[in-house]
Image (cartoon, rainbow, N blue to C red):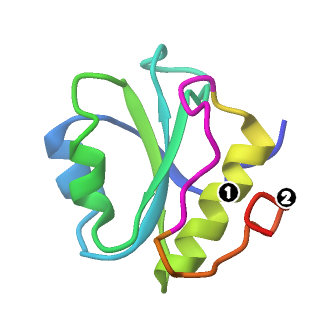
Amino acid sequence: MAETGLNGPFALTEAAINQEVAKTSPGTYALDQSHESGGFHITYVGRSDKDVNSRLREHLGKYKRFKFEYYATPKDAFEKECGLYHDFNPPAKITHPERPMQSGWKCPHCKIFG
């Protein structure tokens, strides 16, 4: 199986998010819904263009663990999210990652955005 290139896994709790995701930054993450230990099974992938800590907290109570990575730009985070989506086909993420309106960004893995 492909590697995620993300940090973790960590328990998806507010304390763990705040400890591990300490800076405000764009980022990408993967979530595991069914396992508290052992192998990490990607159920969902997502990103934040501004604050990955805040975005992760939106998933509290729905998933058990997370992995994440900061990125220098929102575009870098988008491209990583696209890569994770194509590599792992997460069951809770049934549509291709969205790009910001008017950005013109293209998925580096498919032709969905031209």
- Residue 109 is situated, as x and y percent measured from the top left of the image, at 84, 61
Say left or right for 2 vs 45: right
In the image, residue 32 lies at what x, y percent? Answer: 49, 27
Q: Nearer the viewer, residue 84 or 17?
A: 84
Q: Please give the range of residues in magenta.
A: 91-99
Label 2 near label 1: C-beta < 8 Å? yes
Tag 1 residue: 82
- Determine which of the numbered discs, if any, sits on residue 54 in the image: none
Residue at horizontal 22 percent and vertical 23 percent from the top: 61
Q: Amino acid at mark 1?
A: Cys
Vertical relation: 59 (above or below) 75: above
If you read the primary sequence from the N terminus, does the residue marked by circle 1 or circle 2 appear first?
A: 1
Residue 31 % position (x, y): 47, 35
The answer to if 13 sits in the magenta stretch is no
Q: Residue furthest top?
A: 34
Q: Amino acid at mark 2?
A: Cys
In depth, the one of 114 and 105 nearer the eye is 114
Which quarter of the figure has residue 83?
Answer: bottom right
> Depth check: 65 or 47 in front?
47
Which residue appears at 59% of the width and 77% of the height? 76
Q: Count how many numbered circles sit on residues in the image.
A: 2
Q: Nearer the viewer, mark 1 or mark 2?
A: 2
Residue linked to disc 2: 110
Main SS category, magenta section = loop
Q: Mark yes or no: residue 5 visible.
A: no
Is 93 in the magenta? Answer: yes
Label 2 neighbour load within 10 Å: few <14, some 14-19, many 20+: few
